[in-house]
Amino acid sequence: MMRKSVNLFAAIAMVLTPVCAHAAGVSEQQLRAHIEILASDEFAGRDPGTEGEAKTIEYIAADWAKAGLKPAAADGSWFEPVPLVRRSLGSSQLSFTQKGRKLKFADNEIVMIGRDQNYSKQRLSVMFAGHGVNADGKPVGDVSGKLVFMLLAEADFLSEEMKSAAARRDVLIDAGAEAVVLIADNEPGSWNSIRRRSALPRLELVSRDSRAAVQGAASAEYIVGLATAANRDWDKLMRNANKADFPGVDFEITADLEVSTRVERFNSHNVIGKIAGRKKGNGAVLYMGHWDHLGICRPESAEDRICNGAVDNASGLAVLSEVAKALRKKKHDRDIYFLATTAEESGLLGAYAYSEKPVFPLEDIVIALNVDTIAVAPRGAKVAIIGRGTTSLDPMIEKIAEKLGRKIERSDDANAFIRRQDGWALAQKGVPAVMVGGAFADIDLLQRFLEGDYHGPEDELTASTPLGGAAQDADLHIELGKFFANARKYRRDKTGS
Ligand SMILES: [Zn+2]
């Protein structure tokens, strides 16, 4: 009875308002059906290289086949291999010798991970490199073959690019440092959070795997103890380290270092499908969204150990699926590709792998639309653009959104997230890549999610998961696809200006 009256109401609404996108559009129930499966415990948090990956990519391929997409990986299948290496913390032993005298420090104040399974070296020179680089971004001194301790903290004299400790560490690695250990800030919590993060397995693309033989982190107490044992005045060292011309200091002690690390190499996969366009050589529209999440993310003692990633990013995959179904119903001028990426959570790795080895030239992409963490806002949310101002597409996107009755968020606040999403990997190579939707139009609302359920076992599908905004965003993505795949409506400016 109830159900029937709802249908009747919908029918009347459609008659009265022929361009009512809501009535004809993607429903919350359609999205929920995908998320229910992808974020179920059976998929175990969609961790790359696990049974969870196998289930996830098979689900996506089967679903896209049902939607009418054709497989588009280089070998004609749905799956583009992404070679990854996963390193997990093993054990390490580090001892120092000063003028024949052995020095030993508490092992729980330092963590180290090797590049290879087993690492062992004796009599390494030990150096304190301050912030690692000088104002020109060059190594502070000769770090070649040494065990180098480097401050995590940034300094005023560092260039914008070198504010990141990872960037400074890379400079030292390029200069031949054997081992680089980051020194935690002196603030309470800094060391604990670094130690917790170091204990998690780390994924890297085999193609971008340029580590030192050993990398690690140590507490501030550890380095103070070491400096003191080496007869250095730590306060004076720190004062000097904050000067732009600090040359680094050799501690005149040697280290014997043994590190065992669990190293696994495996292929993960991006899933890729397409709707072939009517006209060849006209460019292509690319939709993308990451399929991976954090897998088993809590210790054995925890009641719920699985990070299911319902919002992040089963919701995005659900939207891609419904967009594919809708676009498949008509012919389009341009090819439309759908890319589900792996290992986004480990630093956009699947997207970077795709940017290194695309299945068609990246220059052909007229627009890349990334869909990530989309189930955050309710119906009626404004539309924001991550990447606003970085392409010439904003006015067209906004016009299409307004036609659907959406209001536009005109600030560029959402750009704060531009480096934290897969589109960034393609944008680095000049692809016009944006994220469009309501999830990041209200930054306070998004922040509440990020500080709450995000990246924890609580990111599960519940009755109150907001799917209204995501459904509206799905409708918007369908219209964006129709427009940008139409070679008469959208003539690409090939100069990119
Ligand atoms: Zn995430």
Image: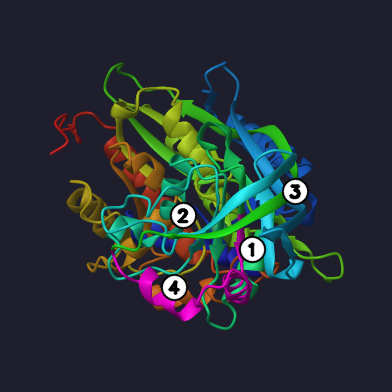
Q: Nearer the viewer, residue 110 or 393?
A: 110
Q: Amino acid at mark 3?
A: Glu
Residue neighbourhood size for the residue with mark 1, other residues' Cα within 10 Å, grouped as few (<14), some (14–19), many (≥20):
few
Q: In the rendered view of the protein, which quadrant contains the C terminus?
A: top left
Residue 86 x, y percent position in the rendering: 68, 43
Magenta stretch bounds:
216-244
Identified at 26% across, 53% down, the residue is 136
Q: Say whether disc 4 or disc 1 marks the residue closer to the N-terminus.
A: 1
Q: Nearer the viewer, mark 1 or mark 2?
A: 2
Identified at 52% across, 71% down, the residue is 450
Does ligand 1 reach within 8 Å of label 3's beta carbon? Answer: no
Q: Secondary structure at mark 1?
A: helix
Q: Which residue is mark 3?
A: 258
Q: Say whether disc 3 or disc 2 marks the residue closer to the N-terminus.
A: 2
Q: CA distance from mark 3 to mark 1?
A: 21 Å
Q: Which residue is mark 4?
A: 237
Q: Nearer the viewer, mark 3 or mark 2?
A: 3
Q: Nearer the viewer, mark 3 or mark 4?
A: 4
Q: Amino acid at mark 2?
A: Ala
- Asked if residue 230 lies in the magenta stretch, the reply is yes
Q: Which residue is mark 2?
A: 166
Residue neighbourhood size for the residue with mark 4, other residues' Cα within 10 Å, grouped as few (<14), some (14–19), many (≥20):
some
Q: Which residue is mark 1?
A: 197
Q: Is residue 186 above or below residue 393?
A: below
